[in-house]
Image (tube, grey):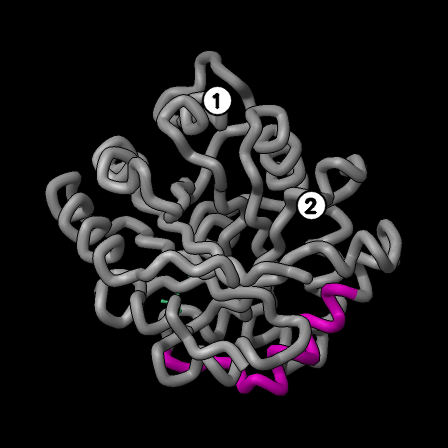
Amino acid sequence: MRTPLMAGNWKMHKTSAEARELAQAVRERIAPASDREVLLCPPFTAIPAVAEVLSGSPIRLGAQNMHWEPKGAFTGEVSGEMLRDLGCEYVIVGHSERRHIFGEQDEILHRKVKAAFRAGLRPIFCVGEMLEERDAGKEREVVERQLRNGLAGLTEQETKVLVVAYEPVWAIGTGRTATPDVAQTMHEHVRTVLADIWSGPIADGIRIQYGGSVKPDNVASLMAEPDIDGALVGGASLDAESFGRIVMFPSS
Ligand code: PGA
């Protein structure tokens, strides 16, 4: 049984004071529930403030990116060890904005995934095709390549804490959500690739989140699909009311 992971990715939004307020509002709205896990990923600078607000609550804390080395001369970067030190349990790796705006490629992302485990963090490894790739009928191929390259050589132990997020680039921040059918087809594909890399039982245990314009009114139909194990929410996670409604989607 995979516990859904409902995560908010705040991207480059919120000062410390604003983040504190939002985290507090989220905390007040979300009733503890054992059938779902909730995660907030604020920007680096707001992590300590959010950690303070979440202390003693079941809501988990994560970061949006990290460097692959534990320390060194890497001006402007933050390591997994530093994030762990602040109380982060999760880290998003390979978000499409990292891939497409900052040019992060498979090899770098593979290093980051390995480094996340080294630091004791659970990586949320993002994959997803661009619109041109889908229009060219290449979405399955693109996602398979991202998975095989990014997740090569993981130990069985590491697969137990790995999370994958399928986020079609054309659905991120566009208001254009993948239909539950389209999303399920891709999630099933992701699971098949994971089963081929490791084994069926290992793939069955890995949570695959959907991301891309998840909103309160579409979350339940997405979550009803058998291979969708949570949501990675951008825009709608910046509002406590809408994120609260997403997190508390009625489970069937
Ligand atoms: P969105 O972002 O919900 O604003 O589409 C999702 C994401 O980028 O993770």
Residue sitting farthest toward the top: 72
From the viewer's perspective, is the residue at label 1 or at label 2 nearer? 1
Left or right of residue 219, residue 15 in this image: left
- Secondary structure of the residue carrying numbered label 2: helix
Residue 55 point in image, percent of width and height: 30, 36
Residue sitting at x 19%, y 50%: 24
Relative height, residue 108 to residue 246 (above, below): above
Tell me where residue 60 appears, x and y as whole percent: 41, 44
Residue 33 at x, y percent in the picture: 43, 60
Residue beneath disc 2? 150
Q: Residue at x 24, y 34 (%)?
A: 52
Q: Residue at x 73, y 55 (%)?
A: 205
31 to the left or right of 96:
left
Magenta residues? 175-191
Task: Please give the label number shown on residue 125.
Answer: none
Quadrant (top left, top right, bottom left, bottom right) of the C terminus:
bottom right
Q: Amino acid at mark 2?
A: Gly
Task: Reply above or below: 240 against 56.
Answer: below
> How many numbered tags mark residues here?
2
Looking at the image, the residue that sits furthest to the left is 17
> Distance between the Cα atoms at labels 1 and 2?
20 Å
